[in-house]
Image: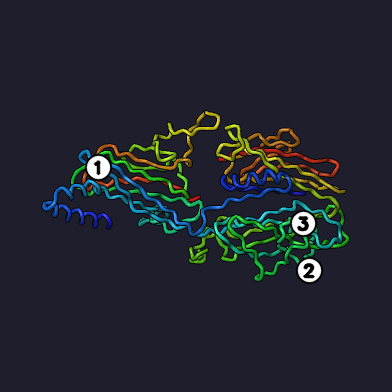
Amino acid sequence: MLFRSVLTRTSLAIVIAGVSTGVLAQESERGCIELKTEALVEESYLDDTGQLATRRIAAEKVVPGDEVVWQITALNVCEAPVAEVAITNPVPLQMIYVGDTAFGNRTQLSFSLDGGEFTTPDALRVAEFDGDSRLARAEEYKHVRWLLEGALEPAAILVVGYNARVL
Amino acid sequence: MTVITQSIKFDRDVFRRLFSALTVACCIVPATVHAVGTPAGTAIENTASVSFSISGTPASVNSNTSTLAVAEIIDVSVTLQSPTVSATSGATGVPLVFLLTNIGNSSEAFSLSGDSVLVGDDFDPIPSTTYVYIDSDGSGDLSGGDTAYVSGSNDPVLAADASIGIILVNDMPGGLADGLAGRSELTVAALTGTGTPGTVFAGLGTGGVDAVIGTTTAEGAIFGQYIIGDISVSAVKSQSVSDSFGGTQPVPGAEITYQIIVTAAGSGTAVGAVFADMIPSDTTYLGGSLSLNTVGLSDVADADAGSYSTTPSAAVSVALGDLTAADGPQTIEFIVTID
């Protein structure tokens, strides 16, 4: 529903573009990607065949210890492809990242401890007091980043996410 | 059999906050530290961002801010603070001390009840005229400043992670032989409600949020035991932290060495004394680290006194045998690693 409304606005902008092309081009550049963040939880249910299945539904309430799927959806609402698409999400302060749960097709995944330097888990290190360092543990990751390989075509959708647990 | 149990649970932040205090008060009383979660009513917010380029021009946008409301989780812990109480036959007003802790994430009131007619013991202690006391003065034992508990009148209300001592007081029947055991049990229950984990009490949490029953079912019960005789067994627990940086910070990977000194005092024998201690949550037992009086014990249940088990929950156990005062202090040590 949100995306439909975005597409409507975009179509309107295109129609008006003939009047003021330069201004609308800037608008288009700023808003070519519509980004949506959702909190989901997995629930079990019986499907049409009576088999136990799982699905993700919107998280209504959580308590400490609950695991939530943060799902982020990017939609290219422009008529041109966008490149170098990088989605970044800080893990909420009241949560910890759950290891090996980040997902996103055609993306290169990286993490950060401080929001500055992003790198892969095998290179993400924590300095120790004695001058040595060790690999960061998953629960220490504070930011997650997905870099899309290739362009996001018009009307294409990129879905990424990860699980985090409420402290 | 005399069973001596200790319980220490914590999360890293709480442990860090309390650690300096614990070291100052070192070894006086068994320390109990519990995990507390994100407070009920907290709004967890999350906003993602995306950067990209279009026709070589960089741009970025933020997503909506998704907000999660943290509901109240109701959980309770009740532990025994008096390992085993020695009492003479016919003694009156003999206390058993428990510790009630709110391990939920919001303030909660609890009801209390006692039961001294239990199976598995040799005699039934007789509830004193005032059966249940609240350790109002925090002395850790029955004293003049304590308050008689009246159900529905002064049910203890505990903030998240707060604890209070509860005392059951019994008289010992006359004519009992030394060595006989009698049990008395404290049951606690959250007043908001109890039930299977996950049960929701809509709108009954603090501030009108939903309240959800946690893994403890929001109630708990544990019994203490009297042994007829004039011997008492005490356990004093202390801990030291060693991190991988050469310091004493309770960071992931750091080792906590627990030392428990069990001492029998008085006359008579504490028959079949067993020390048992749960491995704290968020830690992992270091295999082969259990010892008794500096002699290493194996983790498997075998001929030696020690064992480590993971069911029903991770715990170490040391069979101390028949303890008398003449045996002197028994020093138990084991190590856990912070996850």
Q: Residue at x 88, y 60 (%)?
A: B175
- Residue B80 x %, y %: 70, 54
Q: Is the residue at mark 2 from the same chain as the one at mark 3?
A: yes
Please tell me how crowded label 3 is: few (under 14), some (14-19), or many (20+) other residues with Cα within 10 Å.
Answer: some
Q: Quadrant of the N terminus of chain A?
A: bottom left
**Pointer 2 residue:** B129
Q: Amino acid at mark 3?
A: Asp
Labels 1 and 3 share a subunit: no
Subunit ID for the residue under disc 1: A
Q: Quadrant of residue A12?
A: bottom left
C-alpha separation, residue under disc 1 versus residue under disc 3: 73 Å
Q: Amino acid at mark 1?
A: Leu
Q: Are marks 1 and 2 on the same chain?
A: no
- Left or right, A87 with respect to B145, comes to left
Instruction: From the image, tell me which residue sits under label 3.
Output: B121
Q: Subunit of mark 2?
A: B
Sort mark 1 into few (<14), some (14-19) or many (20+) by Cα contacts within 10 Å. Answer: many
- Residue at disc 2, secondary structure: strand
Answer with the quarter of the image where residue B176 lies. Answer: bottom right
Comparing B280 with B239, the one in front is B239
Amino acid beneath label 2: Thr
Q: Residue at x 42, y 54 (%)?
A: A43
Crowd rating for badge 2 (residues with CA inside 10 Å; few <14, some 14–19, many 20+): few
Numbered label attached to residue A152: 1
Whether residue B143 appears in this view of the structure is yes
**Secondary structure of residue under mark 3:** loop
CB of mark 1 within 8 Å of CB of mark 3?
Answer: no
Q: Where does residue B170 sit, x and y in percent of width and height?
A: 79, 62
Residue at (18%, 50%) from the top-left corner? A24
Mark drawn on residue B137 = none
